[in-house]
Amino acid sequence: QVQLVESGGGLVQPGGSLRLSCTASGTIEHIQIMGWYRQAPGRQRVLVAVFTHGSNGGSTNYSNSVKGRFTLSRDSAKNTVNLQMDSLEPEDTAVYYCHADGIVTPHRYEYDLWGQGIQVTVSS
């Protein structure tokens, strides 16, 4: 069974940077969608950034609140996505969740997988 393993996160001052990584474990042939969501206390989980495969290679979408500050990159060979977060603001404080969908393995198709979540705190 495929699992999403997250790393990175922690405490950073406003204006600082952090990098999150997420790797899908197991023997994987293809991942259609992979990215990050976040959930602040008392709020719903929302999209941060996501990569979607397409006929033209694929595209990356960002929430308006992080455009220009966050960068999603991926290593397809390692089934990994990284989220580089720069110019962090206190409003970025949340639990960040890795998400993957449309995962093809030799024996099954998996969808709507979530990581365990990782805390990011931006505070002085």
Image (spheres, rainbow, N blue to C red):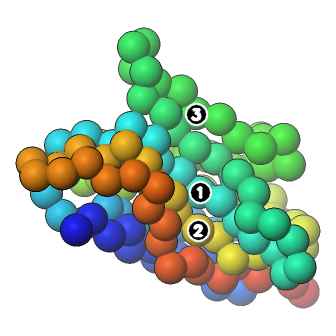
Check disc 2 and report the residue beneath it: 97
Pick the quarter of the image with the N terminus: bottom left
Check disc 3 and report the residue beneath it: 60
- Amino acid at the residue labelled 3: Thr
Specify few, some or many for label 3: CA neighbours under 10 Å numbering under 14, 14-19, or 20 or more: some
Please state if 9 lies on the left or on the right of 41 as rendered.
left
Check disc 1 and report the residue beneath it: 36
**Residue 80 shows up from this direction:** yes
Specify few, some or many for label 1: CA neighbours under 10 Å numbering under 14, 14-19, or 20 or more: many
Depth check: 88 or 58 in front? 58
- Amino acid at the residue labelled 1: Trp
Residue 19 sits in quarter: bottom right
**Residue 82 shows up from this direction:** no
Q: Which of marks 2 and 3 is in front?
A: 2
Please give the name of the residue rendered at 71% of the width and 86% of the height, measured from the top-left corner.
11
Vertical relation: 8 (above or below) 107 = below
Vertical relation: 18 (above or below) 103 = below
Residue 85 sits in quarter: bottom right
Please give the name of the residue rendered at 47% of the width and 55% of the height, measured from the top-left corner.
112
State if disc 2 and disc 1 touch (CB < 8 Å). yes
